Image (cartoon, helix red, strand yellow):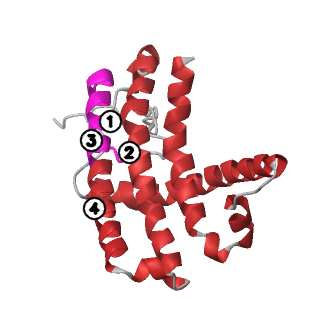
C-alpha cells in the first residue's frame, strides 16, 4: 500500500500539478475551465467538476511534459548533462531499486521541469488578458526567481537520477551511440548488431 501511494504521489507531482497550473492560467480564455474551477454550492456538481479538473489536469500535464522533453531535456543535454548509456541487461534484476530511484528523483525532475514550462504560459495569458497582478513588479520578480530556482532544481534532480541509476545498472561502453532520453525516464534500448554477410576471405598474397 505504501509503494502504491508513493507511485501515486510521484505521478501527481509529475503530471497533475503542472497540468493544474496550466489549467489555472487558461481560466481567462476558457469559460469551460473557469466553470470547472469555480466553487459550486452543490455536492454533485462539485464531484463532477473535480472529475473534469483531474482528467483535464492530467491531459494538460502530459502535454506540458512533451514540451518539456523537447525543450528542457534538450537544454540539459547540450549543456553537458547527458544521459549515460546504461547496461539494460541488469534492469530486470534491479527493477524495484530502479523504480525507487525514479520516484525519488525523476518524478521531482518532471515536476520542476514541467512547471517550468507551465508557469510562463500562465504568466503570458495573464499579460495578454491585462490582469493587474501580472503588471506589478513583485509578481514579475517572483516569477523570475521561481523560474531560475526550478531550472536549477530540475538540473540537480536529473543529475542525481543519472548518477544513482548508473551506480545501479552500470554503463555500457558505447560512446558513439546517440540516444535521447524518453519522457518517462527510461531510455531507448540499444539496437542489436545486425549480422553481417559472409566473412571476407583474406586477400591472397601475390608471389
- The residues bearing labels 3 and 4 have C-alpha atoms spaced at a distance of 17 Å
The residue pinned by badge 2 equals 109
Q: Are marks 1 and 3 in contact (CB under 8 Å)?
A: yes
Q: Nearer the viewer, mark 3 or mark 4?
A: 4
Q: Earlier in the sequence, mark 3 or mark 4?
A: 4
Q: Quick one: quadrant of the N terminus?
A: top right
- The residues bearing labels 2 and 4 have C-alpha atoms spaced at a distance of 14 Å
Residue under the image location 46 percent in, 45 percent down: 182
Work out whether residue 184 or residue 155 is closer to the camera in this orientation and state it.
Answer: 155
Q: Which residues are magenta?
A: 155-181
Q: Earlier in the sequence, mark 1 or mark 4?
A: 4
Q: Is residue 14 above or below residue 131?
A: above
Residue under the image location 38 percent in, 31 percent down: 104
Label 4: few (<14), some or many (≥20) within 10 Å? Answer: few
Q: Nearer the viewer, mark 2 or mark 1?
A: 2
Label 1: few (<14), some or many (≥20) within 10 Å? Answer: many
The residue pinned by badge 1 equals 161
Q: Earlier in the sequence, mark 2 or mark 1?
A: 2
Instruction: From the top left corner, tell me how far across and down residue 120 is, in percent.
Output: 44, 69
The residue pinned by badge 4 equals 148
The residue pinned by badge 3 equals 159
Work out whether residue 196 or residue 24 is closer to the camera in this orientation and state it.
Answer: 24
Amino acid at each position: 500500500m505504501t509503494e502504491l501511494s508513493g507511485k501515486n504521489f510521484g505521478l501527481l507531482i509529475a503530471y497533475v500539478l503542472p497540468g493544474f497550473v496550466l489549467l489555472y492560467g487558461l481560466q481567462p480564455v476558457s469559460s469551460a475551465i473557469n466553470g470547472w474551477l469555480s466553487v459550486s454550492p452543490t455536492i454533485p456538481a462539485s464531484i463532477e467538476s473535480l472529475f473534469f479538473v483531474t482528467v483535464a489536469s492530467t491531459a494538460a500535464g502530459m502535454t506540458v511534459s512533451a514540451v518539456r522533453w523537447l525543450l528542457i531535456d534538450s537544454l540539459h543535454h547540450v549543456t553537458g548533462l547527458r544521459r549515460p548509456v546504461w547496461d539494460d541487461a541488469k534492469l530486470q534484476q534491479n527493477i524495484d531499486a530502479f523504480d525507487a530511484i525514479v520516484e525519488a528523483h525523476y518524478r521531482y525532475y518532471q515536476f520542476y521541469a514541467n512547471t517550468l514550462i507551465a508557469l510562463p504560459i500562465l504568466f503570458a495569458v495573464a499579460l495578454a488578458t491585462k490582469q493587474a497582478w501580472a503588471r506589478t513588479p513583485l509578481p514579475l520578480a517572483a516569477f523570475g526567481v521561481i523560474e531560475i530556482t526550478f531550472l536549477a532544481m530540475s538540473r540537480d534532480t536529473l543529475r542525481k537520477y543519472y548518477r544513482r541509476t548508473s551506480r545501479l545498472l552500470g554503463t555500457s561502453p558505447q560512446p558513439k551511440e546517440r540516444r535521447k532520453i524518453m519522457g518517462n525516464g527510461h531510455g531507448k534500448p540499444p539496437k542489436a548488431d545486425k549480422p553481417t554477410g559472409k566473412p571476407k576471405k583474406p586477400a591472397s598474397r601475390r608471389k
